[in-house]
Image (cartoon, rainbow, N blue to C red):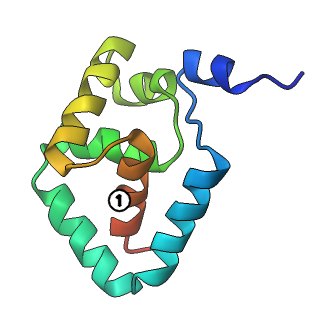
Amino acid sequence: MRRGPCHSVATGEPVLSPAAARRLFDFVADDPAPARRERARAALAALTERERAVAEALADGLTNQEIAAALHMSVATVMAHVPRLLRALGLNNRTQVALLAYDARADR
């Protein structure tokens, strides 16, 4: 059974509108990979180890519940980390955090 975006949001799943996805893909396509990777690594270096772990889990596409289980913390703690990450990185949503952490990876 296919569920709608409201159910996805309520269960902690990421939702991205088609317009936002287009803007995001355009942005990523216009930025050279080595420069983007270095900027991403510098931004993540300013985070605590735990914050970086949450950011990495977001890059892996994990839900709040999956992050909590993987990092041995409560869902409430994961949910508290996300707005702190947004403030620390100057970003607007968890998808941007996920992309930043993904860009920082050496294996891509």
The location of residue 28, given as percent across then percent down, is: 47, 72
Q: Dot 1, crowdedness within 10 Å: few (<14), some or many (≥20)?
A: many
For residue 75, say whether it is visible. Answer: yes
For residue 108, say whether it is visible. Answer: no
Q: What residue sits 75% from the left and 24% below the top?
A: 4
Q: What residue sits 19% from the left and 33% below the top?
A: 84
The location of residue 80, given as percent across then percent down, is: 26, 21
Secondary structure at badge 1 equals helix
Q: Is residue 76 above or below residue 71?
A: above
The residue nearer to you, when weighing 10 against 26, is: 26
Q: What residue sits 54% from the left and 43% below the top?
A: 61
The location of residue 97, given as percent across then percent down, is: 35, 49
Q: Quadrant of the N terminus?
A: top right
Q: Amino acid type of disc 1? A: Leu
Q: Given the current orientation, which residue lies at the most extreme front position?
A: 19
Kindly identify which residue carries mark 1.
Answer: 100
Q: What residue sits 16% from the left and 67% below the top?
A: 42
Say left or right for 21 vs 102: right
Say left or right for 18 vs 72: right
Using the rendered view, name the quadrant where residue 5 is placed: top right
The location of residue 20, given as percent across then percent down, is: 55, 52
Q: Given the current orientation, which residue lies at the most extreme right position?
A: 1
Say left or right for 14 vs 38: right
